[in-house]
Image (cartoon, grey):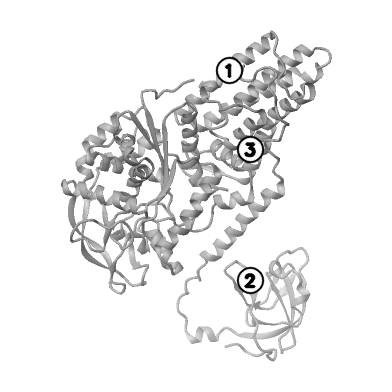
Amino acid sequence: MLYTDKQYKRFTVTSALPYANGPVHIGHLAGVYVPADVYVRYLRAQGADVMFIGGSDEHGVPITIKARKEGCTPQDIVDRYHKIIKDSFAEFGISFDIYSRTSSPEHHATASAYFKKLYDEGKFVEKVSMQYYDEEAHQFLADRYITGTCPHCGNDRAYGDQCEACGTSLNATDLINPKSALSGSKPVLKETKHWFLPLDQDEPWLRQWILESHKADWKVNVYGQCKSWIDAGLQPRAVTRDLDWGVKVPIADADGKVLYVWFDAPIGYISFTKQLKGDDWEKWWKDQDTKLVHFIGKDNIVFHCIIFPSMLHADGSYILPANVPANEFLNLEGDKISTSRNWAVWLHEYLKDFPGKQDVLRYTLCSNAPETKDNDFTWKDFQLKNNSELVAILGNFVNRTLVLTHKFYGGKVPGRTSGTPMDDEVVKELATFPERIGRSIEAYRFREALAEMMNLARLGNKYLTDTEPWKLAKSDPERTATVLNISLQICANLAIVCAPFLPFTADKMHRIMNLPAMGWRDAGRADLLMEGHQIDQPELLFEQIADETIQAQVDRLLRTKEQNALNAWQPAEVKDNVTIDDFGRMDIRVATVLECTKVPKADKLLQFKLDDGMGGRTIVSGIAKYYPDPQALVGRQVCFIANFPPRKLKGVESQGMILSAEDKDGRLVLLSPSDLVTPGCNVG
């Protein structure tokens, strides 16, 4: 049933290596790992020879920064998060053939050898350049160790490689008022030597290979980003950097230098293959009968379409990627996912909060995948996808069919007699689904493929509803048997074609229906279940998710948003200087609250009667929101400005202004002396 890549003997499928400085979140899953897993599971069902490679990217500055903040070593950080990530992927059903790590000795050896071969063959350009150096810390500063003001948007927390506020890529020397993240001091520019991959020399063949050969088959977003880079003119890119964490540069005169993480990380695909395949590894990377496919997010397009191919081309013995089906970004509840702001749904937490519901998240992320544009995940949509689609369509059809089979035939598949035109049409349409689904998967249109799979469940639901076999059991047993036989054949087909998307559900269906192992080529047939085949007792494939369960997740995000607002708070800028005479004109005094009531028809206003030591006065203040029990303020001392001119607020004359401070959460807090003071005393 369809297999457009039969010219290939095998498939090498890679997925972007997640940084081991934090757990995996739904943005990673939707952008890379769910589509990659769907593709690989489909190919395996087709009988293809597939190797699915994954692993943790354990080098790079973000890891060293996290280690410094936590007072531990980079190895401590990667050991912790590699385990979390690997275990989460396994529990979620991402079916890697190997999930390794770039801190392993095998990877260091492979990456070092790769660099050394290109170095010995003169494939690099050696350059001396000016780089920021921290004189207090006595080390060169990687991009993420430099912060300053973005020249484009004015954000004063931009990094040396990117401004996260406006998204602009930067060079460290672009920053205004740069400072070291290590010491806080102003860095100086100092000479340092590095080796560069001369991308400018690769521009002619890259232009032909990408812009001419892959214009028709690469995704528009991938092709467009590559074209933009090539048309702007490619520049040499450093493959080494001054850092003490990473793969050491394996040549003389390179002390204190490691391979740049963008150079070392994709070599991980090769080193992991060696770990898995041993001496048989080369055919997966050097045989033209192998198809190489990279699954990545859009922030990795240039690395996998221009830079890594240039590295492979420089060696001369490797195949180049046939396709790089990169997705756009997934947002969360209308806001950009951010690990630094904890604005994410973390996979390991989801697996604890929703045990046994891996397929619900897989379904939601695949059906909402950001294939052509950024998309949004909301918890309400997650609930809707489960309750209105998985439960009400797929689960409902399968359960109704199996329950009726047990009710009327003791769980044995009934025989089928000659059918009606409706039966013939359903059987005919059933046969078309494997190719329809497969065609979309092979074109990397996974949302479309998933929708087709659900259309098969819709076909079954409609057929069962239209024929109403529960009404025919006594009056027309032959018709009842035929309808349930065809419905059971649809269920068996669903167990096959849903497997790439919903592997846990597919396994459950196979178990309940006692199905033997079947491949994609078996799908589309209406004779998968023979007459008399025994079906086990039905079980619900999916369960409703309650409103309160979803609200708990929404509330968690709201708390995160509130905490982020608090963390982002900064004191207001100091106003222009004033003189002691200016201050002296403000008559600030202490008073004791005698009465406090809400002002009628004014939700924000409280009316204070104060003992000011001068016969008393009334002041109206807009703080009712923050003090819902006005009586609780009676007896409290407050500070007020006594020489403001009176003015009427909602018909009440206010004779001054009570002083309050605005906290970082926006709450107004009354200012009071810490010790009891005689009413009327001056503040100054």
Sequence-wise first label, 1 or 2: 1
* Coordinates of residue 282 in the picture (x, y in percent): 30, 37
Q: Which residue is mark 1?
A: 525
Callout 2: helix, strand or loop? strand
Quarter of the view holding residue 660: bottom right
- Residue closest to the eye, 336 or 650: 336
Say whether residue 676 is left or right of residue 372. right
Q: Which residue is mark 3?
A: 385
Sequence-wise first label, 2 or 3: 3
Q: Which residue is mark 2?
A: 668
Q: Residue at x 64, y 47 (%)?
A: 355
Name the outermost residue toward the right: 474
* Coordinates of residue 622 in the picture (x, y in percent): 68, 69
Q: Nearer the viewer, mark 2 or mark 3?
A: 3
- Residue closest to the eye, 293 or 671: 293
- At label 2, counting other C-alpha atoms closer than 10 Å, the crowd grade (few under 14, some 14-19, many 20 or more) is some
Callout 1: helix, strand or loop? loop
* Coordinates of residue 121 in the picture (x, y in percent): 16, 45
- Residue closest to the eye, 612 or 297: 297
- At label 3, counting other C-alpha atoms closer than 10 Å, the crowd grade (few under 14, some 14-19, many 20 or more) is some
Q: What is the three-letter code of the residue carrying label 2?
A: Leu
